[in-house]
Image (cartoon, rainbow, N blue to C red):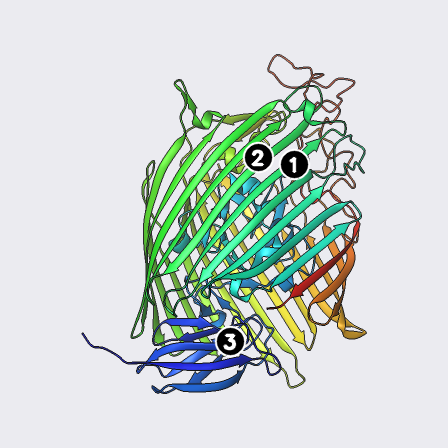
């Protein structure tokens, strides 16, 4: 055993005018680092092996500083501004690395991006990210999920601080409960990431990273309201306990209690909501290798949608139709660095849902515990990552999923797993990533999910990545697909459903340009191909009275091409994106495009100053091509395909000093809703309990004078937000430390 002497290196990180708080100071030799304090100062212990430090911060170019083995003061280190997404990322390899150095392509979005269009939750906030589409699945209660590159919401794995918080039961309403005020940044991986995050991460990963208490303002508030009488408030403050524990407390409230029926079908256009959540995060760092954090959050939500004269007195009855959901949710997320090589991560969630859909009751309770131990080791050209995890799932509801002849039988199981990755530096500009994960599922035995990645840097501003991987997913219809519970269609499961499997390959090219005139331009292009076997998709077409679920007797494919362009010049910034999609299933030699899958899409977010540096305008928008929609039959008068449609927004901001910002603007500038150019959005809204239907001997609905198209009640025909133009005004205030 050899002992190495340690020395202290100190300094101050600055942007040239003000100190930078929260900058990362990383020692490659020790594989450890620290963060700068509120005044920009930092202190880090290094050994005789250390020859350099890497300093980085969101929005600035990383900087390498050569050091020696003696105690030294580096003085003030100025980071140069860079707005071309050179962020430090975590999601790709479970450790802080520069985005350009990661073998896995990871997109990073800051709070500034989310605030270009103020939104009360993450579900709405990410609708202007290229290749990402929030999908509303029900016209009545507005349940939704997030599609990545044309894949259904259950294929998207949503994490909070790297922990699997939003899954299963929470995937339906949990996304609506994540306020943007608590978010430090959002990292997105498009494509399978099962090696690190488990076999369910088939379509991609959205990792929501919350704010650090020690670098949050002493007090902050973000309050706004709209002309539809929506009101959202984010309030928070940071404090300390003693000298080593930092605390961040955040409170979010959202209320919308103004039933509006612009399409005159006697149903609410948008779900009424009352939501409250409280978030508290503790962090501590006794030294550079033993930092830790613990976050707690409680969420309560009461939402309903339905006929305008519905009240809670009619809840669960068959007189006036309404869908009412009460949600109680608790989350605990923590991590602890044991040394520079070992880290423990843990989480626990409990989600209780008490809901009725017309006269159909659905109550469910879910508990998930997660524990993971991670070991990192850099040895020569090898960068090893080892993880051991175990997940406990407890789930109970009022459906046949957890019922048998003996009564209620909650679904309980352990899901242990282990993964090993090695990122090999083949040369100065080439890296090879080899990863393998194995999980043991109680019903499906051993599940393996390998991945291989390769990255080549042609120069510091140009790189190419290639990744292949596999995925595995066990489907729970009642927690993932709200359509199985709402409306008049009967649920039909024809067989015991086998798990889905997927195989993916993607290639990613990134180029950054600096012009002599001061422009910084980033171009990123990706192409992918995903092949599915045993895929499970809802079948709306075979029978208008049913939703049928079976394993696909064939295969499914999701492939496409996407491009992002970012341009920055001074205070001007523009992000433009476009995606081409080819998604289909092939069964019995018949090729079919799934419903709710657009052929192409485009997004943009543009920021430019107005009149002075303190005033700016944000223009955000998206554009979607045609997608097939779930009609009840050929006689259904609603359009078979959605038209080209777009949601666009304007925001005007005035910033006084560095603390106070007043903003106002217009949401849905074009006043687009899916009810336009359609005779109706909800089928048979006048008869939601199907009392007036007539059937033939085979059980098929007959055409009658009061039902000439032979339809039943159906609220699933929705593909865009059913909320028209509205104005908003708000105030943001930050009081620094």
Find residue 374 and report its horizontal and vertical position in percent. 34, 58
Task: Sort mark 1 into few (<14), some (14-19) or many (20+) by Cα contacts within 10 Å.
Answer: many
Find residue 94 and report its horizontal and vertical position in percent. 41, 61
Residue at image coords 40%, 48%: 199
Q: Secondary structure at mark 2?
A: helix
Image vertical order of residue 367 relative to residue 149, above or below:
above
Image vertical order of residue 651 relative to residue 471, above or below:
below
Q: Quadrant of the C terminus?
A: bottom right
Which residue has dot 1 on it? 303
- Can residue 712 be seen here? The reply is no
Find residue 343 and report its horizontal and vertical position in percent. 35, 60
Q: Nearer the viewer, residue 310 or 9?
A: 9
CA distance separating discs 1 and 2: 15 Å
CA distance separating discs 2 and 3: 44 Å
Q: Compare marks 1 and 3 and give the one earlier in the sequence.
A: 1
Which residue has dot 3 on it? 462
Which residue has dot 2 on it? 482
Q: Quadrant of residue 733?
A: bottom right
Q: Secondary structure at mark 1?
A: strand
Which label number is shown at residue 335?
none
Left or right? Give the position of 503 relative to 519: left
Residue at image coords 63%, 36%: 302
Find residue 41 and report its horizontal and vertical position in percent. 50, 78
Residue at image coords 67%, 43%: 719
Mark 2 vs mark 3: in front: 2
The residue most toward the top is: 697
Q: Compare marks 1 and 2 and give the one earlier in the sequence.
A: 1
Q: Quadrant of the N terminus?
A: bottom left
Q: Secondary structure at mark 3?
A: strand
Left or right? Give the position of 389 relative to 127: left
Task: Sort mark 3 into few (<14), some (14-19) or many (20+) by Cα contacts within 10 Å.
Answer: some
């Amino acid at each position: 055993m050899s002992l190495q002497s340690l020395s202290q290196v100190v300094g101050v990180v600055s942007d040239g005018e003000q100190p930078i708080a929260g900058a990362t100071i990383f020692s490659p030799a020790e594989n450890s680092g620290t963060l700068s304090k509120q005044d920009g100062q930092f202190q880090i212990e290094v050994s005789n092996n250390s020859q350099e430090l890497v300093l980085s911060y969101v929005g600035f170019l990383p900087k390498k500083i050569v050091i020696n083995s003696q105690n030294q003061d580096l003085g003030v280190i100025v980071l140069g501004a860079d707005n071309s997404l050179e962020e430090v990322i975590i999601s790709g390899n479970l450790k802080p690395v520069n985005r350009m150095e990661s073998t896995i392509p990871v997109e990073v979005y800051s709070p500034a991006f989310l605030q270009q269009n103020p939104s009360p939750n993450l579900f709405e906030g990410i609708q202007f990210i290229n290749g990402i589409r929030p999908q509303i699945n029900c016209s009545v209660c507005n349940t939704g999920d997030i599609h990545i590159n044309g894949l259904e919401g259950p294929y998207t794995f949503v994490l909070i601080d790297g922990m699997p918080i939003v899954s299963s039961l929470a995937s339906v309403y949990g996304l609506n409960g994540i306020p943007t005020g608590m978010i430090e940044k959002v990292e997105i991986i498009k494509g399978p990431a099962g090696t690190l995050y488990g076999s369910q991460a088939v379509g991609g990963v959205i990792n929501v990273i919350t704010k650090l208490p020690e670098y949050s303002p002493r007090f902050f508030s973000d309050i706004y309201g709209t002309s539809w009488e929506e009101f959202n408030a984010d309030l928070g403050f940071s404090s300390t306990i003693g000298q080593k524990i930092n605390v961040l407390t955040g409170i979010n409230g959202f209320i919308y209690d103004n039933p509006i029926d612009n399409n005159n079908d006697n149903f609410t256009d948008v779900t009424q909501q009352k939501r409250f959540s409280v978030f508290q995060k503790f962090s501590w760092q006794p030294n550079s290798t033993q930092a830790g954090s613990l976050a707690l959050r409680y969420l309560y939500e009461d939402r309903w949608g339905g006929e305008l004269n519905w009240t809670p007195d009619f809840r669960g009855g068959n007189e006036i139709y309404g869908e009412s959901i009460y949600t109680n949710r608790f989350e605990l997320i923590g991590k602890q660095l044991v040394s520079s090589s070992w880290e423990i991560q843990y989480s626990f969630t409990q989600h209780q849902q008490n809901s009725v859909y017309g006269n159909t009751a659905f109550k469910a309770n879910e508990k998930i515990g997660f524990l993971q131990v991670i070991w990192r080791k850099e040895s020569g050209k090898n960068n090893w990552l080892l993880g051991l995890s175990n997940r406990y799932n407890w789930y109970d509801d009022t459906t046949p999923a957890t019922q048998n002849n003996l009564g209620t039988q909650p679904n309980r199981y352990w899901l242990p797993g282990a993964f090993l990755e090695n990122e090999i530096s083949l040369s100065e500009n080439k890296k090879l990533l080899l990863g393998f994960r194995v999980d043991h599922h109680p019903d499906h035995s051993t599940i393996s999910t390998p991945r291989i990645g390769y990255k080549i840097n042609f120069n510091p501003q140009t790189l190419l990545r290639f990744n292949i991987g596999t995925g595995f997913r066990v489907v729970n219809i009642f927690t993932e697909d709200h359509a199985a519970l709402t409306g008049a269609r009967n649920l039909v499961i024809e067989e015991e459903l086998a798990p889905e499997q997927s195989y993916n390959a993607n290639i990613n090219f990134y180029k950054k340009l600096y012009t002599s005139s001061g422009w910084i331009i980033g171009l990123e292009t990706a192409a992918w191909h995903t092949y599915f076997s045993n895929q499970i998709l809802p079948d709306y077409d075979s029978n208008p009275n049913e939703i049928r679920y079976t394993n696909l007797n064939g295969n499914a494919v999701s492939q496409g091409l996407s491009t992002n362009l970012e341009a920055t010049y001074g205070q001007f910034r523009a992000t433009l994106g476009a995606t081409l999609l080819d998604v289909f299933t092939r069964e019995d030699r018949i090729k079919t495009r799934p419903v709710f899958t657009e052929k192409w899409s485009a997004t943009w977010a543009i920021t430019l100053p107005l009149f002075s540096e303190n005033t700016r305008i944000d223009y955000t928008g998206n554009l979607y091509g045609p997608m097939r929609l779930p009609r009840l039959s050929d006689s259904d008068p609603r359009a078979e395909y959605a038209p080209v449609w777009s949601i666009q927004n304007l925001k005007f901001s005035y910033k006084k000093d560095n603390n106070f910002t007043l903003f106002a603007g217009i949401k849905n500038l074009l006043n687009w809703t899916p009810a336009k150019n359609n005779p109706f959005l909800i089928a048979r809204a006048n008869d939601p309990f199907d009392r007036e239907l007539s059937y033939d001997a085979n059980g098929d609905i007959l055409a009658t004078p009061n039902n000439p198209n032979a339809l039943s009640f159906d609220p699933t025909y929705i593909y865009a937000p059913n909320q028209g133009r509205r104005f908003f005004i708000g105030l943001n205030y930050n009081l620094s430390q």
